[in-house]
Image (cartoon, helix red, strand yellow):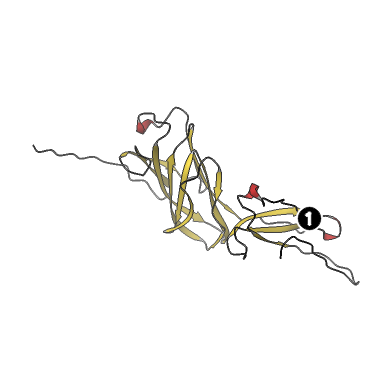
């Protein structure tokens, strides 16, 4: 027998997200393509009644979202996802976040210095729970005020993988105290193996000062 099949898919612009819907969790069996506006380098999808392109499926499928992110001001940036399944993010052809085997939490890539410009991004999701949703965004490192500590956290013991930054109000005499117990700063997605820096700009009057530091590690 002889058969012939043809089709079409929309051509999305750089200011849009191209969404590809797959019937299988491994990004195979393409069933549909659509375009959505890329607003402020972010994407928010929710399928409470299931994905129409996939016969209203609520799990057991995968999605690939492709777009271009714009950095208007150079600085330290990171990407984050929150989804009902595992996610993977590629920025400028480099995988910056790989939580394909994890589920249902907010995950962030390490901060990286990005010059102004445009960066191709690919976000992949395999949906394993109900409800089905996907949120993607890019955020700059927060800028702490003159009366705050800048706390930078790293996902290793050698200050290499910059994972989070927080601002902490000054205590009296520029004191800083934190106790993470035996588990580490898990609220930041870190474990007990991490490193950090705390920096600020204290104002000193002419005098003699003693600087002290106490920690359960180096």
Residue 11 position by quadrant: top left
Residue 143 position by quadrant: bottom right
Q: Secondary structure at mark 1?
A: loop
Can you give x and y, in whole percent of width and height, for residue 5 in the image?
18, 39
Which residue is depicted at the point 36% across and 44% down?
A: 26
Number of disc labels: 1
Which residue is depicted at the point 64% across and 48% down?
A: 186
Which residue is depicted at the point 49% across and 55% down?
A: 70
Can you give x and y, in whole percent of width and height, for residue 168 in the image?
74, 53
* Vertical side of 80 occupied by 53: above or below: above
Can you give x and y, in whole percent of width and height, for residue 14 in the image?
41, 50
Quadrant where the C terminus lies? bottom right
Residue most toward the top?
Answer: 49
Which residue is depicted at the point 48% across and 36% down?
A: 133
Can you give x and y, in whole percent of width and height, for residue 204 in the image?
86, 67
Image-based side of 106 in relation to 56, left or right: right
Quadrant where the N terminus lies? top left
Q: Which residue is mark 1?
A: 177
Q: Is residue 45 in view? A: no
Comparing 9 with 177, the one in front is 177
How crowded pointer 1 is (Cα within 10 Å; few <14, some 14-19, many 20+) is rated as few
């Amino acid at each position: 027998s002889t058969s012939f099949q043809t089709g079409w898919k929309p051509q999305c612009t750089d200011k849009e997200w191209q969404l590809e819907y797959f019937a299988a969790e491994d990004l195979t069996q393409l069933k549909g393509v659509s375009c959505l506006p890329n607003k402020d380098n972010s994407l928010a999808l929710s399928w409470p009644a299931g994905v129409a392109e996939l016969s209203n499926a609520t799990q057991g499928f995968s999605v690939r979202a492709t777009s271009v992110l714009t950095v208007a001001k150079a600085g330290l940036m990171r990407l984050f996802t929150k989804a009902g399944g595992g996610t993977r993010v590629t920025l400028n052809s480099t995988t910056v976040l790989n939580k394909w085997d994890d589920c249902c939490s907010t995950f962030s890539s390490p901060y990286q210095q990005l010059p102004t410009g445009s960066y191709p991004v690919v976000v992949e999701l395999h949906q394993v729970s109900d409800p089905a949703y996907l949120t993607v965004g890019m955020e700059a490192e927060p800028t702490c005020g003159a009366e705050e500590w800048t706390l930078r956290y790293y996902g290793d013991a050698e200050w290499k993988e910059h994972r989070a930054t927080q601002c902490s109000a000054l205590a009296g005499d520029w004191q800083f105290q934190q106790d993470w117990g035996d588990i580490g700063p898990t609220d930041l997605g870190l474990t007990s193996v991490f490193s950090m820096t705390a920096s600020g700009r204290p104002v000193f009057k002419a005098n003699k000062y003693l600087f002290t530091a106490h920690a359960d590690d180096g």
